Image (cartoon, rainbow, N blue to C red):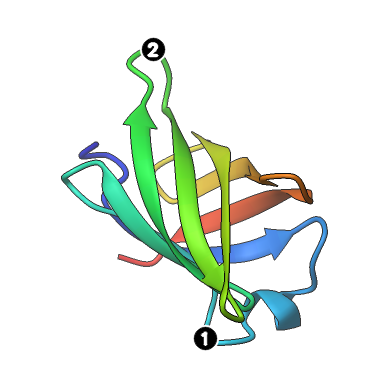
Amino acid sequence: MHDFIGKWRIKWMSNWSQEYVDLLEPGYMEFSRDALGNFVLGAVKGHLDVRISSKEPSLEFSWQGICEGKEMSGRGKVDFLNEQLGEGELFIHNSDETDFIIERLH
């Protein structure tokens, strides 16, 4: 997990405007050493359970979160183009899916 540890800013999403992504605070994903993480996206705050690929610079995750008092969950994947930039897909269980781009903050 060492290559991906840290906070990543959500820079773009195919289904939602940046204004929505940054609704509560600037949208982000944060990956920690224990293969867990957190994220904020629009009105959703949640937790990540991360699995690292051993063959390519990518990771997959499942997530759980709360949006306006309603529990939500889903899954996603990030492919890292380099040490500073990743692109991926986010799926909401029984709902939307979106492509996204993240950029390392620290």
User: Of 49 and 69, which appears nearest the observer?
Assistant: 69
User: Of 37 and 81, which appears nearest the observer?
Assistant: 37
Question: Looking at the image, is 87 positioned above or below residue 60?
Answer: below
Label count reads: 2
**Which residue bears the numbered disc 2?**
55
Residue at 53% x, 45% y is 86
**Which residue bears the numbered disc 1?**
25
Q: Secondary structure at mark 1?
A: loop
Give residue 22's quadrant in the image.
bottom right
Judge left or right: residue 17 versus residue 24. Answer: right
Q: Quadrant of the C terminus?
A: bottom left
Residue at 52% x, 86% y is 25
| Mark before the other along the chain sequence, 2 or 1 | 1
Q: Residue furthest left?
A: 34
Q: Within 10 angstroms of label 1, few (less than 14), some, or many (20 or more) residues?
A: few
Judge left or right: residue 5 versus residue 89. Answer: left
Residue 35's x, y, as percent?
25, 41
Q: Residue furthest top?
A: 55
Q: Depth-wise, is mark 2 or mark 1 nearer the camera?
A: 1
Q: What's the amino acid at mark 2?
A: Lys
Judge left or right: residue 52 versus residue 16. Answer: left
User: Of 58 and 106, which appears nearest the observer?
Assistant: 58
Question: Looking at the image, is 1 positioned above or below residue 57?
Answer: below
Residue at 28% x, 48% y is 36
Residue 90's x, y, as percent?
64, 46
Q: Within 10 angstroms of label 2, few (less than 14), some, or many (20 or more) residues?
A: few
Cα separation, mark 2 vs mark 1, equals 34 Å
Q: What's the amino acid at mark 1?
A: Glu
Q: Secondary structure at mark 2?
A: loop
Q: Quadrant of the N terminus?
A: top left
Question: Looking at the image, is 56 positioned above or below residue 23?
Answer: above
Residue 49's x, y, as percent?
35, 43
